[in-house]
Image (cartoon, helix red, strand yellow):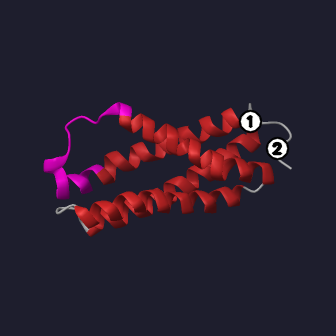
Amino acid sequence: MKILILYASTVLVFLALDAVMLTRFMKPLFERHIGHLMLTEIRLLPAALFYLVFIAGVVWLVSFPALRAGAPLQALIGGAVIGAMAYGTYEFTSYAIMRDWHPSMVAADVLWGTVLTGVSAWAGVAITRAVVPGLTG
């Protein structure tokens, strides 16, 4: 039960924060540089698969160990590292091989992925500790 709460709370925090950032900052930034390559409507299946699998990995590798250790800060730091690695892999590879990829896109997305993943991992642990009896100690 606690793993389901941990996963669900992490997904909800991640999606809520990312939705705001994507619509208000990232989409305009990417449209400015590679708008001619972007779809008018996102492909929901690949997006959903990324979110669900990425968060499952974060929970497995970072959040659940931090929850068991009673260390939400561990989730924040571990999540930030995983986020920097994942978003960095995508962004630096794209910058290395794509003509119109801009350094501002790399910097913004890597920073955002680092913060988003760390905060979401921390929040999932904190929420789970608050909701599940016996985990606050």
Q: Per the image, is 35 magenta? A: yes
**In what quadrant of the picture does the N terminus appear?**
top right
SS under mark 1: helix
User: Residue 69, image x and y in percent?
Assistant: 79, 54
Q: Per the image, is 41 magenta? A: yes
Q: Is residue 118 above or below residue 38?
A: below
Q: Is residue 96 above or below residue 21?
A: below
Q: Residue at label 2?
A: 135
Residue in the picture at 67% in, 33% down? 4
SS under mark 2: loop
User: Residue 25, image x and y in percent?
Assistant: 32, 54
Q: Residue at label 1?
A: 2
Left or right? Give the position of 28 relative to 123. Answer: left
Q: Amino acid at mark 2?
A: Leu
Left or right? Give the position of 55 relative to 103. Answer: right
Query: Residue 56 occupies which quadrant of the picture?
Result: top right
Q: Residue furthest left?
A: 36
Residue 40 disc label? none
In magenta, the rendered stretch is 27-45
Query: Badge 1, how many Cα within 10 Å: few under 14, some, many 20+?
Result: some
Check if mark 2's residue and mark 1's residue have beta carbons within 8 Å: yes
Q: Is residue 10 above or below residue 108?
A: above
Q: CA distance from mark 2 to mark 1?
A: 9 Å
Residue in the picture at 25% in, 57% down? 29
